[in-house]
Amino acid sequence: MSHGFSALKEMDLNTFAEYFTSKLALSCLVYDNRGFGTSDTLSGQPRHEILPPVQCSDISDAITYAQSRADVVGTKIGIWGSSYSGGHVLWVGAVDRRVKAVLSQVPCVSGWDNFHRLIRPDFIPGLNTMFQEDRLGRAAGKTAQTLPVVDEDPLKPSALPTTDSYEFFSAWGKKSNWKNEVTVKSIEAFREYDPSFHIHHISPTPLLMTVAENDVLTPTDLALKAYARAIEPKELQILPGGHFDGYSGTKFETNAGRQAAFLKKTLCV
């Protein structure tokens, strides 16, 4: 189980894991993405940098670790991802055939389309300049440039310029080790990423995609279009509300319950 863009495992992933393990005969491996929270990174590499190919490779490494454990049935591995990692599991579920179930929650399915939904057109030239300056600076040995993940003012530069993103992350920032920072390169990598490219190759592995009805961060219509390209066996869960509403509160039981039912019939048999 891995979280979304800059988020930590304590930001409700533990709640899902506890729910699944209390209802089903399975184990959950929950971890922070590389360079975030309690996870380290390679020597000389910046923290708070999000490179999708690296995070996808790390999911496959987590599968290898799980398979190495005596208390895990290595032939019954499922992967669960939310938001940015909801896109990662679409990629990994297609190319890593060890995966036997894919649960993709409020996924980012197209970096290019998502980037251009989130970022105002008149801000993009400035970002392109920032990308270039960061690359030149790194080549000259300078420290990687960073941006806030969220900002209360949507007109100021940030990675996730939506009101619900600011509310979610700023609340968790007060009670966790989450830091409001990502590298500029993370934003450039986001724009070029196409996580649903292989979605039609996930089959015959079962897929459950959970989509928020009014998602403005990873837009609902983009997720539904990607789901339409997936091949059976597949299931779709549409939750009322926005991007973050299924993580906790009144919609959690409905959301996690449907996911548990999917896990029961795909892995716990």
Image (tube, rainbow, N blue to C red):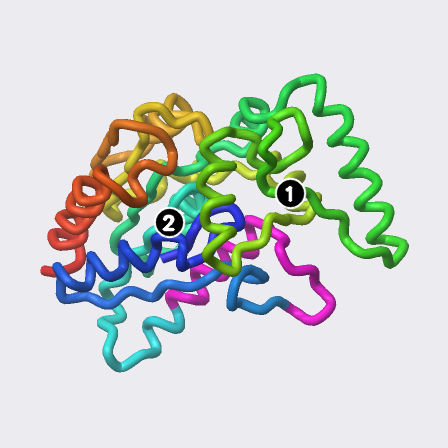
In the picture, which quadrant includes the C terminus? bottom left
User: Which residue in the protein does label 1 denote?
Assistant: 148
Residue 134, picture quadrant? top right
Image position of 221 with respect to 1: above or below: above
214 lies left or right of 192: left
User: Which residue in the protein does label 2 denote?
Assistant: 81
Image position of 47 with respect to 182: above or below: below
Question: Is residue 192 something that shows in the picture?
Answer: no
Q: Residue furthest right?
A: 140
Residue 54 x %, y %: 56, 56
> In the image, which is nearer the foreground, mark 1 or mark 2?
1
Q: Residue at x 37, y 63 (%)?
A: 30
Image position of 154 with respect to 17: above or below: above
Q: Nearer the viewer, residue 124 or 205?
A: 124
31 lies left or right of 179: left
Residue 92 x %, y %: 41, 51
Residue 91 on the magenta span: no
Few, some or many residues within 10 Å of mark 2 (<14, 14–19, 20+): many
Q: Residue at x 14, y 66 (%)?
A: 25
Instruction: Inspect the image, locate mark 1, and give the three-letter code of the amino acid beneath it.
Output: Pro
Which segment is the magenta one?
Answer: 42-63
Instruction: State if disc 2 and disc 1 touch (CB < 8 Å).
Output: no
